[in-house]
Image (tube, grey):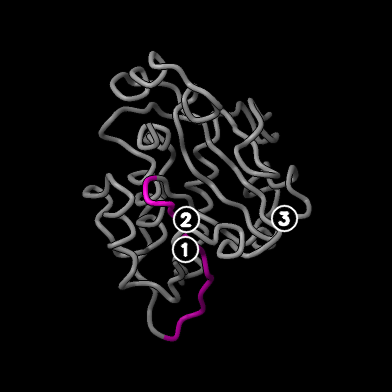
Amino acid sequence: MLVIACQAGGNARAADKEPPLRPGAPSKTIFVASNGWHSAIFVPRNELTPDSLPEITAFPEARYLGFGWGDAEFFPARDPGFTTLLSAAFLPTPAVLHVTGLRVHPEAAYPKDEVIALKISHAGFRNLIAYLDGTFARADRRPGKPVAPGLDPHSYFYRAKGEFHLFNTCNSWTARGLAAAGVPIDADDIVRAEGLMASLRPLSANSFK
């Protein structure tokens, strides 16, 4: 059931891929966290503006914002039924985006998870934020309204673009965002969390478990 909860994928707007960071070039640091089945991308909130990502206004005290996909019914459910599980696994289903505001470093927030730090170029960071922004299903540039409380303190679920199915997972979505940011991974080959993190470990600025 845990694997199904992270299923995501979609038609989120993907920016053009940015070339990998050149040695010595100015960079920004982002983080990818995984608990072994689900993955999420964390970025410093102070690097964002409401123009680039309107939903940041819901997290005024956060130091980092985390983004992860899940099935619109299964992911937010505290006790999902078997029918919901089957639907999430085998049928294309609507998406939600889970957004978490952290007041501490991701490593401190998730001490049992693997957290990998990645350095990307300034242009790559802009591409990543465009990718994240493009996942929100909103009609205009006003902040989207949460559809459910999140799974963590200071977190919410938002309606998202795209559909889920068994072969297009949250880890695939994470990989596509990182590839757009210039991280040299083959997003087409990523389905499981272990495959994603194995691809990122050799590229890590720092790796925490």
Indicate whether residue 136 is drawn in magenta: no
Q: Residues within 10 Å of mark 3 (few under 14, many from 20)?
A: some
Disc 2, SS:
helix
Q: Earlier in the sequence, mark 1 or mark 2?
A: 1
Residue that extends furthest to the top in the rendered view of this protein: 83
Residue 115 — which label? 1
Answer whether residue 109 is visible to the viewer in this image.
Answer: yes
Residue to which mark 3 is pinned: 62
Residue 14: where, in percent of width, then height?
40, 45
Residue at 42%, 59% in the rendered image: 181
Residue at 55%, 43% in the rendered image: 133
111 over 78 or under it: above or below: below
Which range is magenta?
24-37
Residue to which mark 2 is pinned: 127
Disc 3, SS:
loop
Name the residue type under label 3. Ala
| Mark 1 and mark 2: Cα distance apart in space | 21 Å
Asked if residue 130 lies left or right of residue 4, the reply is right
- Which one is closest to the eye, mark 1 or mark 2? 1
Name the residue type under label 1. Val
Answer whether residue 120 is visible to the viewer in this image.
Answer: no
Name the residue type under label 2. Asn
Quarter-of-image position of residue 150 = top right
103 over 88 or under it: above or below: below
